[in-house]
Structure formats: structure tokens, C-alpha cells
Amino acid sequence: LRACSDNPNIAVFDLTQNSNLIIGNQENVTLTYHQSQENAENGTNAIAFPVNYNGIDGEFIYIRLEGENACITAFNSAEDNRFQLFIDDRPEINLTASNEVICASPSDAQQADNEIGEFDLTQKDEEINPNAGDGNSQVVYYASEEDFEAGIP
């Protein structure tokens, strides 16, 4: 699991991002996350807030998947019940990207009067974030501040 942080040693992770991968199509199961193999095996000291976990770069998180009658093997092996946390530096972002301008053709005159145009903002991705194509980061656009706050791209 990867997260970005200004601090290279610690970042906030949502451990539940792996839940669907771990559970698959199994029903009536309980999934818990632990900081040690021993705690996972014993079903003790589960991480209380897995959606907001302060993790350390390189740390292993151990999972416990329990059905109605017993623990269930995850990841095809009883010994393979862990995943690792990785912290990446935040990408450098260019906050002064150039303006995007389009010109209306004479046939678009009525539309131009309404000041409506269509822009492909993804053409600005690499200018805003030079690392946008590396697969580890992305640029997301929002129509308004309210959409940003609500997480609606």
C-alpha cells in the first residue's frame, strides 16, 4: 500500500483499501488488521482505526480473516497474511500552469456569445505535475470548491 507524505518516515494510510482484495467473494467474514503476526494469530490488539492509520515506511501490516467457525486462509497461504506500507514523497506541483485558450470559429459565434467552450484539461496534467505519467500520481480536476471538498471529481 502506498501513500504520499511530506515526512519520509510516517504517513496516514487507509488500510481498508485492501479489504475487497483480501475478502474476495467470501461472505460472513470479519477482517482485522494487526501490527504483528502474533496479534493476528491470536486475534488481539487489532488496529482500532484502519481507515486512518499512521504507518511507517516499510512496515508490515498483518491481517486476520475470520469466518463463523475458524480463521480463513488469505492470499492462498496461512503464512502470507501481510502487506507492506510504502511512503512516497509528495510530487512537485506547478501551481502556475499556463492559461488554456480556445478561439471560436465564425460558425461557433452564437456559442461564443454564451462564453461556453470545451477544454481538455488532461492536456495540462504533465505541466501541473511532471510525474503524472509515472503511475504513482495523478492530477484530478474539480468543477468547484464544493466538489473538491466532497471528493467529487
Image (cartoon, grey):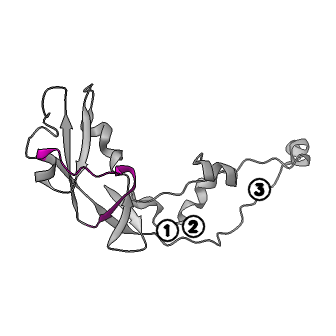
Q: Looking at the picture, how far across and down is residue 147, in whole percent?
A: 65, 48
- Whether residue 126 sits left or right of residue 54 in the image: it is right
Mark 2 or mark 3, which is nearer the start of the sequence?
Answer: 3
Residue identifier under label 3 = 102
**Contact (CB < 8 A) between labels 2 and 1?**
yes
Q: What's the magenta region?
A: 41-57
Which of the labelled discs sits on residue 130, or is there none? Answer: 1
Q: Nearer the viewer, residue 80 or 92?
A: 80
Please rate how many residues cluster around mark 1, counting C-alpha atoms within 10 Å: few if below 14, some from 14 to 19, many from 20. Answer: some
Bin the neighbour count of mark 3 within 10 Å (Cα to Cα): few under 14, some 14-19, many 20 and up.
few
Hey, what amino acid is under mark 3? Answer: Ile
As helix, strand or loop, the secondary structure at mark 2 comes to helix
Q: Which of the image's four quarters has the N terminus?
A: bottom left
Label 3 or label 1, whichever lies nearer to me, is 1
Q: Is residue 1 magenta?
A: no
Amino acid type shown at disc 2: Glu
Residue, x 7% and y 46% (percent of image)? 79
Quarter of the rendering containing residue 128: bottom right
User: Within 10 Å of the Cα at label 2, are there few (<14), some (14-19), or many (20+) other Cα atoms?
Assistant: some
| Residue 16 sits in quarter | top left
Q: CA distance from mark 2 to mark 1?
A: 6 Å
For this view, does 20 lie left or right of residue 41? right
Which of the numbered marks, if any, corresponds to residue 127? 2
What amino acid type is highlighted by mark number 1?
A: Pro
Asked whether the beta carbons under mark 3 and mark 1 sit within 8 Å of each other, the answer is no
Q: Position of residue 145 (x, y in %)?
A: 68, 55
- Give me the residue at 46% from left, 69% from top: 91
